[in-house]
Structure formats: C-alpha cells, structure tokens
Image (tube, rainbow, N blue to C red):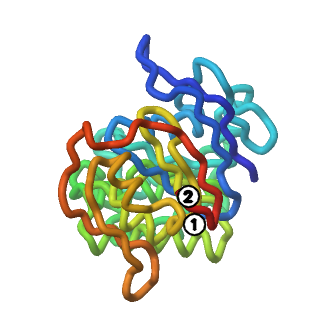
Amino acid sequence: MKLTADSLVLAYGPKVIVDGVSIRIPEGRISVLIGPNGSGKSTILRALSRLLKPQSGQVVLDGHSIQTMTTREVARKLAILPQQSTAPEAITVENLVWYGRHPHRRAILPPTPADRRAVGWAMAATGMDKFRARPVDELSGGQRQRAWISLALAQETDILLLDEPTTFLDLSHQLDVLELCAELNREQGKTIVMVLHDINLAAEYAHHLFVIRSGCLHTEGDPPAVLTSDLLRDVFGVEARVMPHPVTGAPLCIPLRKVPREDRRPHRPAVVENGGSL
C-alpha cells in the first residue's frame, strides 16, 4: 500500500510549519523522521494521517488523495498514534483498545471472533493484557502509552504511524516498543513510520531516515548514508563522532559539544539516495 506526500505546505493559522515537502514512504519498511524540535516532523505525520489538511499539495494513500477518502476508509488502511492522546474519563484499557475495531464494525452488530482476537492480540503484544480492567487514567505514563499503541494495533492496518511512541517509557519499554515494531514489520510486512528523538535508536531500527530541518526535507536515505558528523553539526548543532555500533554495525552517534549557530552551514536541501553519501 503506497503512501506519498507531494509538495506539502502545512500551517497552523498563518504560521507555515512545513514548506514544499515531498516524500515517498518505502512500502514494507520502517521509516523514521528525525530533526530538531519544531522542525515539522509531527506536523508531517499529522498530514500523512489526514489529521491536518494541507494548505497546498496532497497526500496520496493507495492511489487516492487522502482528503477525498472517508474517515472509515482511511482508518482501515492506516493507524496513527498521535503525540498527545486523551482517553474518555474512567475508560478501561480493554474498552480503549476496542476503539481500534470501530473501522471494521457495524454499530448494530455484536463483535465478531476476529474483533475479539485482534483486541486480545493487541493487548498481549504490548504487555497490557494484565491491565485490561484498569482505568487508563490510573496508569503510569509508560503504561498509558502502551495502551494507546494497543489501540493502534487493534486496527490491523497495513500502515502504522507513530508520533514519538517511546515518550514516557524507560529504556526497557522503549526497546519493547521498537522490537515490537520490528517484529510487525518483519513478520507481517507492515509499513511503519515513526517520529523519534533518539538518533541512535532511529539508526538502529530504521531502514530509511527522513531528516527534517526548518520545515523542509533536508536529506533522506538509509542510516549509514545519512548520519554523518557534518549532518549532526549542521542540522542538530552538535559536534559528534559517528562510528559503527560494535555489536550491530548501525551508526552510533557520540555527541561531544554544542556547535555555535554561526559555525553551522546554511540549509541546502539535498536528497541522499540509499548507499549514497553527503
């Protein structure tokens, strides 16, 4: 299932956040958007999911402009975990996860065995089955995040969009979530797009990186091609050493110091193809 964005201009009121971004999400792969705070990563993800209407340009999902599709049609093809989610007061984990089945159900019909299997699997996959009867507002931040991921998984879509899915999670649960994403991609062929702030985790789990700077696509490609000392200096303002991880071989970024703004190169968008270099 194809998901693309063409010449997107995205704004909140009069303020333009993303200006002219075009991206092609690789099918059946894990893609990660990285970039400084406020660069437009989450805004792009919202547009990809139809939560934000572009001022101009379009998002195309499975051959159709996403703005022409119904909410139910979109929800059967992609699921999104927004950066901030609010649950109804006192709702339990299991009832929250059941919301993920709404695109597949008719209101007047009882749940099907497929619905029940999907909800049970989604909670088990995130370790939330033991909390199924707990109100979501009584959970810790990490548990609450996993409950929302369960809801997204229960939709059983081919495309999964996750905006900072490791927020509020300790290192162990961060790895749980990312390993789950890797498993879903590897075993079910799901296309996964994430926003992550941890560059080393992005390098470890992504097949493809999109680097966003000042509302534009700065560069893209596989992690070894994209993550260089020059990029970390110019995009993130950090002097860093990049070396292969001693175990996995993925790029490992070791920050050394902050770079003064006047020492950074000006923004010049340039696409890096897989296997290329800056």
Q: Which mark is residue 260?
A: none
Question: In the figure, 248 relative to 66: above or below?
Answer: below
- Mark 1: amino acid: His
From the top left corner, tell me how far across and down residue 250 is, in percent: 45, 76
Q: Is residue 192 visible?
A: yes
Q: Nearer the viewer, residue 211 or 139?
A: 211
Can you name the residue that lies furthest to the left here? 257
Q: Which mark is residue 207?
A: 1
Q: Nearer the viewer, residue 108 or 3?
A: 3
Q: Nearer the viewer, residue 207 or 270?
A: 270
Drawn side of residue 136 relative to residue 45, left or right: left
From the top left corner, tell me how far across and down residue 10 is, in percent: 52, 24
Question: In the figure, 127 relative to 14: above or below?
Answer: below
Residue shown at 61%/63% (left/top)?
A: 276
Drawn side of residue 91 relative to residue 104, left or right: left
Q: Which mark is residue 31?
A: 2
Q: Secondary structure at mark 2?
A: strand
From the top left corner, tell me how far across and down residue 222 is, in percent: 57, 64
Q: Is residue 157 visible?
A: no
Residue shown at 41%/67% (left/top)?
A: 177
Q: Are marks 2 and 1 in contact (CB under 8 Å)?
A: yes
Residue shown at 53%/40% (left/top)?
A: 269
Q: Would you call the spot at circle 1 few (<14 residues within 10 Å), some (14-19), or many (20 or more)?
A: some
Residue shown at 61%/28% (left/top)?
A: 8
Between marks 2 and 1, how big is the CA–CA gap? 6 Å
Q: Secondary structure at mark 1?
A: loop
Question: In the figure, 125 relative to 169: above or below?
Answer: below
- Mark 2: amino acid: Ser
Can you name the residue that lies furthest to the right here? 63
